[in-house]
Image (cartoon, rainbow, N blue to C red):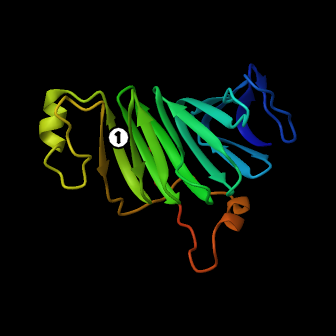
Amino acid sequence: MHAERARLGDAEASEGSTVFAGERLSTDAGGSLRITIPALTLQLGGQSSVVLGRVPGPEGNLLAELSYGTLVFAAAPKGSMMVTAKEAVVRPAGNAATVAQVWAVNGKELRIYAQRGALEFSYHGESQTIPEGNYRVVLDPSERDVAALGSDPTTKPSAKHRPTFILVAIVVAVAVGIAIPVIFHHFESPDRPGTSPPSPPTKP
C-alpha cells in the first residue's frame, strides 16, 4: 500500500499496511491511496471511499465497493475483479489487460473512463459492453432524461419500457487529474501508451 492523507478504517493508513476483506479505505481532500496485489492495482482519488472484499464463488474475484469518489484500477489478463457503485457493476469485459476509472458523481450518475480494454456494465438486470472511451451513465433516468438523451446517436438504444440506465459517450478536451501510477505502465503495449483519465472537478 502507498497512502497519503488516507485512512484504513478509523486509523491512518500508512505505506506497507495490510488490508483485510471488509475493511473500508478512504481518502481526504488531496489524498490518494494505492493498493497492489498480484495482477491488480487499485488507486483511490481524493475524497473517496471503497470497501474491498471477495465475490462469493469458487473464483473469489476481488470486489471493490465504491461508496463515493473515484477509483482507478488496472488488471492484468488474469486479474479478475468487480467494481460496484450505486448498485451498478463494472468489470473487465474479457480476459485482457484493462485500465479504467469509475467516478461516482452522485446518486444517479457515474462517469466511466475505459482507458484500456472494454468493460461490462450492468444495473438492475440490464447490461451493456462499454468500448474504450469516456462515458456518462445516468441511472434510473426520468422521462425527461430519456427524451433529452434518447436522440443522441451515442446513447444506448431505448427499450420499449423506460431503460434502467442511459449510457452517453462524452468528449473531454483536457484530461488532467488522477495520474495512473507508473506501476500501471506494464499493462500497456509500447505502441499504445496510456493517457491520464479525466478527473472530477475541484469542489469549491
Residue displayed at 72% across by 49% down: 40
Q: Residue furthest top?
A: 10
Crowding around mark 1 (Cα neighbors within 10 Å: few <14, some 14 to 19, many 20+) is many
Q: Is residue 118 visible?
A: yes
Q: Is residue 139 above or below residue 39?
A: above
Residue displayed at 67% across by 64% down: 187
Residue displayed at 45% across by 27% down: 86
Which percent across, then down, holds residue 42?
67, 45
| Residue at image mark 1 | 137
Answer left or right for 171 relative to 179: left
Q: Secondary structure at mark 1?
A: strand
**On the image, which quarter does residue 116 sit in?**
bottom right
Answer left or right for 68 relative to 5: left
**On the image, which quarter does residue 67 sit in?**
top right
For badge 1, the amino acid type reads Val
Which percent across, then down, holds residue 60?
72, 34
Of 124 and 49, nearer the camera is 124
Quadrant (top left, top right, bottom left, bottom right) of the C terminus? top left
Q: Is residue 93 above or below residue 124?
A: below
Q: Is residue 197 visible?
A: no
Residue displayed at 86% across by 34% down: 18
